[in-house]
Amino acid sequence: MGLPQLQSAIKILSRSEKFRLVQFIIYELAEEESSSMLKNGKEYPVWSPYNADDAAGILLNELDKHGVSRYEK
């Protein structure tokens, strides 16, 4: 089906069907984008706050400097 036939078919859709079509197209584009960025079987580093003792110390120092209690809820 060519673009002119597709455009004609879209014109007869209801408003809600057009929204669902747009959602479908956006989902498809996102899938293509993510599949081109990440490769199967390859490892990617992920940052984690675990074992980030230096960062925790800096945060506590900043809280102390600004008079924020560590135990406030």
Image (cartoon, grey):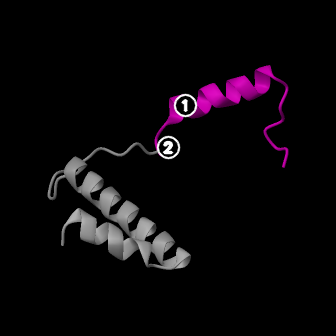
**Left or right position of 5 against 58:** left
> In x, y percent, where is residue 61?
69, 24
Label 2 crowd (10 A; few <14 / some 14-19 / many >=20): few
Residue farthest toward the left in the current orientation of the protein: 41
Q: Which mark is residue 49?
A: 2
Give the secondary structure at mark 1: helix
Residue at image coords 49%, 43%: 49
Rounded to the nearest angstrom, the CA distance separating label 1 from label 2 is 8 Å
Q: Look at label 1 and name its amino acid.
A: Ala
Q: Which mark is residue 55?
A: 1
Residue at image coords 49%, 37%: 52
Kindly check if marks 1 and 2 are in contact, taking CB atoms under 8 A apart as contact.
yes
Residue 59: in magenta span: yes
* On screen, residue 1 above or below 65: below
Residue 67: in magenta span: yes
The magenta stretch is 49-73
